[in-house]
Image (cartoon, grey):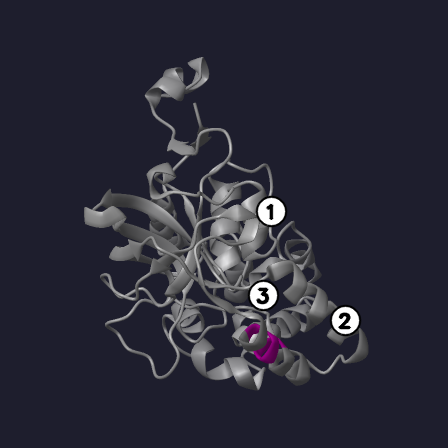
Amino acid sequence: MGNIAQFTPVDYIKRLHSLSVPGYDGTVAITRYMSANPAYGGNARPADLLNAIAAAVKKRTDLAAKTKVDGYARVFTGQGDPDGFINVMSLVVELREELMKTKALAEPLKKGNYLQELCDRGVFGMDCIGFVGTYMSESCLEPSYPGGRPLDYTAKFPPIKDVDEIEQYSVVMKADGQHIQMINDYELLANGTLKVDLCQSASWAGAFDSSKGYGPQFNGGVLLRPGGGSYLPVEAFRAAMAKFKQQNSDPKAIVAKEKELRKEMTETNRKFGFCGGAIFQLGGDGSPPNPVSGSVYIGVMKGGGIRIKTPRDWSAVEYQQR
């Protein structure tokens, strides 16, 4: 029973933290959250690199094919996969001297560990959908990258109605539709409270703090409590935002309107919400602390949840290879 994944979410984080790029000394870790959405920081720094590479390959036409591979553009929007990151980073290795002519890239590219420096400055990064979506495709739970918005994942991960329905490798979706995480493991405590180990890509506001997690990260021992919380009527909210965008295309005005509508339309003390799912309260505790807390839904993948591939799932060919 269940959907078979090739590896766990925490194994995927380890992979994102140890990318091997041809021609570069050492491994590279994706260490920052990055989203193309202006409401969550935007992608101005990655756009500088995208434009610089586009100009550079006009002189190095032998490398142009690397800019046309599937998933290339997603690397610059926070939704790249490991092969996509490695592909773009290999272009940086090849075009380093030319790319140094771009003012915004010159300083980090002078460093000995220049690829890691670019990651630490947010030129390479991943958003929450990028993490969950690429985990789904890379682990073979999906045939290709699904994309979408956090609450779109309820189509394949219906929200549970009781804490007893939770499964390992469930998804955690903010009730306001602004974030998605995965549960790598959990422990049931008293009164229906859960202690969960989260995997996600997220960040913190303010100055960098080395005691906190940034980008793809594992947050162990976060408390998850049943009992209700805040609810946003998502369909009505999306309809109101769509109507506003028809009349106003200014990014700053759109961000402000979204914030205003979320405040106006959010209901409190609701037991159930989107798709009839129970509303839980996710804490900001854990090790390191969970950066995205609040009211959430828990979704279990249709077909019996997710389980990780074991030797009993190997094909005859895989047995021979081992």
Horizontal relation, residue 173 to residue 234: left or right: left
Q: Nearer the viewer, mark 3 or mark 2?
A: 2
Residue at image position (75%, 74%) is 245
What is the three-letter code of the residue carrying label 3? Phe
Give the percent coordinates (x, y) of residue 289.
27, 66
Q: Give residue 317's quadrant in the image.
A: top left
The disc placed on residue 146 is 1
Give the percent coordinates (x, y) of residue 35.
54, 68
Disc 3 crowd rating (10 Å Cα; few below 14, some 14-19, many 20+) is: many
Q: Quadrant of the N terminus?
A: top left
Q: CA distance from mark 1 to mark 3?
A: 17 Å
Say above or below: 57 vs 153: below
Q: CA distance from mark 3 to mark 2?
A: 28 Å
Residue at image position (30%, 55%) is 225
What is the three-letter code of the residue carrying label 1? Pro
Q: Quadrant of the C terminus?
A: top left
Foreground residue, 43 or 226?
226
Foreground residue, 125 or 146?
146
Residue 67 seen in the figure: yes
Q: Nearer the viewer, mark 1 or mark 2?
A: 2
Q: CA distance from mark 1 to mark 2?
A: 26 Å
What is the three-letter code of the residue carrying label 2? Lys
Q: Dot 1 lies on which element?
A: loop
Q: Magenta region, mostly helix, strand or loop?
A: helix
The disc placed on residue 243 is 2
Q: Dot 2 lies on which element?
A: helix
| Residue contact at pointers 3 and 2, CB within 8 angstroms | no
Magenta span of residues? 258-262
Q: Earlier in the sequence, mark 1 or mark 3?
A: 3
Q: Which residue is mark 3?
A: 76
